[in-house]
């Protein structure tokens, strides 16, 4: 279900406001199994911060 | 290095000396405690020494907490980055790992070669199980950190109590679900520790495997391959424990079974007291409110906090799980325990005593004020608790 890179190739970064973990769409997260280009919006609904698990996807702030 | 200092625009120069710095060496004590029994028996010839490690933990522990009292000191926030970069604190967590291995093998060899009486065997085996249960505490501190070294050391530490699924279960399961009825590692009001253990141990195991299975499926690699972080740790346990059985024969079987189960029990005990009855509220979108400081019980007792890497400053840990132990903070007006974990473990093992002390403290918390709707109550116990305490405050 990996989604294609957006048309403008404008990949973004999103940060956990609690611990500072950053999800960078251009890198994905290899350990978590999200390949480079995997969009933040396509992360599962139940996604929690991989580092602290305190914050949910909707808490992340766009950088 | 000490003293830490920084120049700020609003507060001028901020200087801080960590008075506990040298005392953190006490964190090396837990893995070494069982050796007291071995050395004592060696020099005196008396098996009575094998009971000393248990007394050290569960008699001296609560007494020292009572004698040395509490500590509410916090480092200034602007100096936390410096405090976290000080490698001294890290080295202590690294050191406890080989110490747990050393003690585990020393006791195994002792049990395998000394022809102990049944009572002596049980005393030192139970004590080592408890001591190695605190290897899970070391793994807990290491496993929350982002560096590869610490993440590997956590898995290596978990191999001693054969509990390799802990870090995944704890970091990604417990922290996500803490203080909700869905969390097998958060105890409910009216649930005693023995009932809790039957829910917690299998529940945690299943949740860890489910989380790892989902991760590996996303990576498109086999659940049963070397990428599986649970299997990595289990393999190390298997090699160690099978070697001991091969070397010393059948006596290792009861030793390892009792040792492993007691280690898991130490974690069960910690989980039981850390969130007893506390409940996060459900929001309108069906998700739970984010974990707040009042969703954990705390103890500020100096002695046990030094032995346990500040684990008892549990509210700050749950609010900021990647914060290092030396910078965890005390906050005012949080749910508080009457003793450190060593004393509270003993209380928990006597359910009537536990309920007597804790139920009143729980209902008296500022955010609960007797309202059972804000408490994580064991389903079968609701009517009895309501009959006993009423629904005041609703």
Image: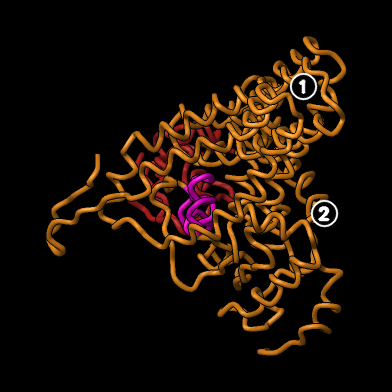
Chain colours: A red, B orange
Query: For the point 59% across and 56% down, which residue is it?
Result: B63
Give the residues in magenta.
B301-321
Q: Position of residue B190 (x, y in %)?
A: 79, 68
B104 or B37: nearer the viewer: B37
Do badges 1 and 2 share one subunit?
yes
On the question of residue B355 being in view, the answer is: yes
Q: Position of residue B381 (x, y in %)?
A: 84, 71
Query: For the point 36% across and 59% down, which residue is it?
Result: B74
Q: Mark 2 falls on what kind of element?
A: helix
User: Disc number at residue B194?
Assistant: 2
As for residue B317 lying within the magenta part, the answer is yes
A13 or A22: nearer the viewer: A22
Pinpoint the chain carrying mark 1.
B
B63 or B268: nearer the viewer: B63
B365 or B88: nearer the viewer: B88
As for residue B233 lying within the magenta part, the answer is no
Q: Position of residue B274 (x, y in %)?
A: 62, 58
The image quarter containing residue B235 is top right
Quadrant holding the N terminus of chain B = top left
Query: For the point 34% across and 34% down, which residue is it?
Result: B87
């Amino acid at each position: 279900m990996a989604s294609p890179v957006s048309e403008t190739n404008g990949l973004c970064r999103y940060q956990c406001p609690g611990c500072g973990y950053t999800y960078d769409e251009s890198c994905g997260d290899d350990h978590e199994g999200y390949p480079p280009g995997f969009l933040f919006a396509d992360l599962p609904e139940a996604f929690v911060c991989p580092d602290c698990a305190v914050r949910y996807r909707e808490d992340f702030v766009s950088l | 290095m000490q003293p830490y200092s920084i120049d700020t625009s609003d507060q001028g120069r901020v200087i801080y000396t960590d008075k506990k710095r040298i005392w953190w060496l006490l964190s090396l004590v837990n893995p070494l405690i069982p050796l007291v029994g071995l050395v004592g028996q060696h020099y005196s010839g008396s098996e009575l020494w094998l009971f000393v490690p248990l007394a050290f933990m569960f008699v001296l522990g609560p007494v020292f907490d009572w004698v040395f009292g509490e500590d509410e000191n916090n480092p200034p926030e602007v100096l936390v980055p410096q405090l976290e970069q000080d490698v001294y604190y890290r080295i202590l967590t690294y050191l406890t790992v080989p110490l747990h291995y050393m003690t585990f093998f020393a006791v195994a060899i002792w049990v395998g070669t000394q022809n102990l009486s049944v009572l002596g065997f049980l005393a030192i085996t139970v004590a080592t199980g408890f001591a190695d249960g605190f290897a899970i505490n070391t793994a807990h501190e290491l496993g929350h950190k982002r560096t590869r070294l610490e993440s590997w050391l956590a898995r290596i530490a978990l191999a001693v109590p054969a509990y390799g699924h802990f870090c995944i279960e704890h970091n990604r399961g417990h922290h996500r679900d803490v203080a909700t009825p869905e969390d097998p590692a958060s105890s409910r009001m009216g649930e005693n520790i023995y009932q809790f253990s039957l829910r917690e141990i299998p529940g945690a195991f299943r949740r860890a495997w489910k989380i790892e299975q989902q991760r590996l499926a996303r990576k498109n690699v086999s659940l049963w391959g070397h990428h599986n972080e649970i299997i990595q740790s289990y393999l190390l346990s298997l090699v160690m424990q099978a070697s001991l059985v091969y070397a010393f024969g059948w006596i290792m079987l009861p030793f390892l079974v009792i040792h492993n189960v007691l280690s898991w029990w130490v974690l069960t005990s910690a989980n039981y007291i850390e969130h007893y009855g506390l409940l996060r509220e459900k929001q309108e979108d069906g998700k739970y409110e984010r974990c707040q400081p009042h969703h954990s019980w705390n103890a500020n007792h100096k002695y046990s906090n030094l032995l346990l890497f500040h684990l008892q400053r549990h509210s700050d840990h749950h609010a900021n799980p990647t914060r290092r132990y030396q910078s965890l903070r005390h906050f005012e007006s949080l749910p508080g325990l009457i003793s450190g974990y060593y004393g509270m473990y003993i209380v928990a093992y006597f359910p009537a005593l536990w309920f007597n002390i804790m139920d009143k403290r729980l209902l008296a918390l500022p955010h609960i004020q007797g309202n059972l709707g804000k408490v994580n109550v064991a389903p079968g116990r609701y009517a009895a608790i309501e009959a006993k305490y009423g629904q005041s405050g609703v």
